[in-house]
Amino acid sequence: MRELEVGVILKPQGIRGELKIKPFTDSAETFFAFERVFLDGTPYRVLSARAADGCVFLCLRGVPDRNAAELLHGKRVTVPRDEAPELPAGSYYIADLLGSEIVTREGERIGTLKDITKAATDIYTAGMDGRDVLFPAAKGVVVEVDLERRRLVVDKTRFYEVAVL
């Protein structure tokens, strides 16, 4: 089963087993669509979800109190890829982009996408010749995303203007 990592458990919230989660999604409200999540491969049914201050608060079946919630601190929250909600055109799940080849419009290979750091403008980490190179996904840098071929096409000039080499 292919999974998407959608967050990490920060801490218990209150005494009734609610979990505070840092979401890896564009919007914390994305969690409202999940009927179940997985923690270390174990499925948990979502009983309730709410969002506040950029975090998600989940109550899960099988996590009845603070003691049970404390045991889950630091766990990664995943969902099956086929259960994730569809995204609007031009939006992508990070897991679908990682590992993509980065090429210029001319077809020159630059590297491989290794990581994405969420920010006002997402920061991409490219593996280039054995080193990590950071660049923002700013307007005009990434000009095409081809999920089928697992390729990101960048404007070479803009890439080298903004990349931290």
Image (tube, rainbow, N blue to C red):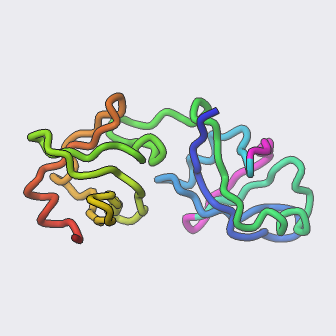
Q: Is residue 94 left or right of residue 69?
A: left
Choose top left, top right, bottom left or bottom right for residue 69. Answer: bottom right
Choose top left, top right, bottom left or bottom right for residue 71. Answer: bottom right
Q: Residue at x 45, y 48 (%)?
A: 94
Residue 59: x and y, percent? 79, 54
Residue 103: x and y, percent? 20, 44
Choose top left, top right, bottom left or bottom right for residue 83. Answer: top right
Residue 87: x and y, percent? 44, 37
From the image, which quarter does the C terminus lie in?
Answer: bottom left
Q: Is residue 118 left or right of residue 16?
A: left
Q: Residue at x 80, y 61 (%)?
A: 18
Q: Residue at x 20, y 46 (%)?
A: 109
Q: Is residue 43 magenta?
A: yes
From the image, which quarter does the N terminus lie in?
Answer: top right
Residue 40 versus residue 84 in the image, above or below: below
Residue 10 versus residue 5 in the image, above or below: below
Residue range highlighted in magenta: 41-54
Pick whichever, 15 or 104, lies toward us. Answer: 104
Pick whichever, 85 or 97, lies toward us. Answer: 97
Q: Is residue 56 magenta?
A: no
Residue 130: x and y, percent? 32, 62
Q: Is residue 71 left or right of residue 143?
A: right
Pick whichever, 111 or 61, lies toward us. Answer: 111
Q: Residue at x 32, y 30 (%)?
A: 149
- Secondary structure mostly seen in magenta is strand
